[in-house]
Image (cartoon, helix red, strand yellow):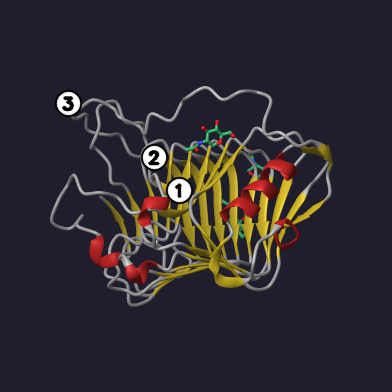
Amino acid sequence: MVLRNVAMRALLLLAVVSVAYAAKGKEKEESADGPAASGLGGEYDITKLGAKPDGTTDCTEAVEEAWASACGSTGNPTIIIPKGDFLTGALNFTGPCKGDGLTIKLEGNLLASNDLAKFKSNWIEIMRVKKLSITGKGNIDGQGKAVWTKNSCQKNYNCKILPNSLVLDFCDDALIEGISIINSKFFHMNIFQCKGVTVKDVKVTAPGDSPNTDGIHMGDSSNVSIIDTTIGVGDDCISMGPGTTKVNISGVTCGPGHGISIGSLGRYKDEKDVTDITVKNCVLKGSSNGLRIK
Ligand SMILES: *[C@@H]1O[C@H](CO)[C@@H](O)[C@H](O)[C@H]1NC(C)=O
Ligand SMILES: *[C@@H]1O[C@H](CO)[C@@H](O)[C@H](O)[C@H]1NC(C)=O
Ligand SMILES: *[C@@H]1O[C@H](CO)[C@@H](O)[C@H](O)[C@H]1NC(C)=O
């Protein structure tokens, strides 16, 4: 299905279902101090902190150390992930950070471990960080192929959820540009309670038959732009859950995948509306749906 110059604006009023609202329960208190090291915003190259670009050595510690130092720095610190393959387990990038912004320059590839014991819920989880940029030509590679068979969500509603790859929670003014996010174990990107997120020139790809590998899901967020981005995955290319408003999807190519979706809605009591969604200059090709509200 090809869709050009079609602007869709959706304003939804929701049916109320009598199930308790369980929006992730993520509002736990964080200390205002942030991580340990502090200094002037500089460059933190993970290979100088012990990361090995061989794709088999677990580099979690080096990357976490780079995060702690960068997040504790004033100014505009940059974490550098140079060319090479860096294997990691769960990465916990929690703010608030001390600087005016923080950049992750991804020139190489981050690979997710296939040892599921290394994950609680997500792979790369970025929380409460303002003005975060992730730029470069590298890949965020979930290496999902090895674990997709462990996904039982098609058969079992209370299935164990595999790790999402790139998760932004409570992050305002984020930019994700140039990178590729591939073969996620579960969702490629999840945006929750963020204001002002731009995803630009990004490629999101996984096989059309990989389970629950949604491209970009967002909920409870506003002012999200997805621009000039190619998404081919095994589930929704883009989906917008309750509380999403002011979204601009433009120049996106979707397929394979289940299309661009508003929803799923109506699952919880007192869900917030989805409003002010614009989809323009997009191509949906080889996707099982075009645009839908579900
Ligand atoms: C992530 O890091 C923050 C701050 O360092 C800490 O408070 C939190 O407990 C960590 N979360 C996990 C899941 O390890
Ligand atoms: C929307 O977010 C962008 C950053 O992605 C920011 O520059 C812009 O000021 C925001 N606009 C509004 C109206 O909040
Ligand atoms: C959406 O983004 C495109 C590309 O940057 C821009 O041309 C357009 O004006 C934006 N539309 C809205 C409604 O913000």
Q: CA distance from mark 3 to mark 2?
A: 19 Å
Element carrying mark 2: loop
Looking at marks 3 and 2 on the same chain, the residue that comes earlier in the sequence is marked by 3
Give the residue type that dot 2 points to: Val
Question: Of the residues tagged 3 and 2, which is closer to the observer?
Answer: 3
Side (left or right) of 100 relative to 287: right
Residue 257 visible in the displayed image:
no
Give the residue type that dot 3 points to: Ser
Residue visible at 43% across and 30% down in the picture: 26
Where residue 206 appears, as percent x and y from the top left, is 39, 71
Report which quarter residue 39 is drawn in.
top right
Dot 1 crowding, Cα within 10 Å, few <14, some 14–19, many 20+: many
Q: CA distance from mark 1 to mark 2?
A: 8 Å
**Residue linked to disc 2:** 274
Q: CA distance from mark 3 to mark 1?
A: 27 Å
Dot 2 crowding, Cα within 10 Å, few <14, some 14–19, many 20+: many
Side (left or right) of 142 relative to 19: right
Give the residue type that dot 1 points to: Ile
Quarter of the image with the N terminus is bottom left
**Residue linked to disc 3:** 18
Where residue 285 appears, as percent x and y from the top left, is 37, 76
For residue 163, above or below residue 38: below
Residue visible at 67% across and 34% down in the picture: 35
Find residue 277 and name its label. 1
Where residue 141 appears, as percent x and y from the top left, is 49, 67
Contact flag, marks 1 and 2 (Cβ < 8 Å): yes
* Depth check, front residue: 263 or 3: 263
Residue visible at 49% across and 36% down in the picture: 193
Looking at marks 3 and 1 on the same chain, the residue that comes earlier in the sequence is marked by 3
Report which quarter residue 100 is drawn in.
top right
Ligand 3 - quadrant of the structure image: bottom right
Element carrying mark 1: strand
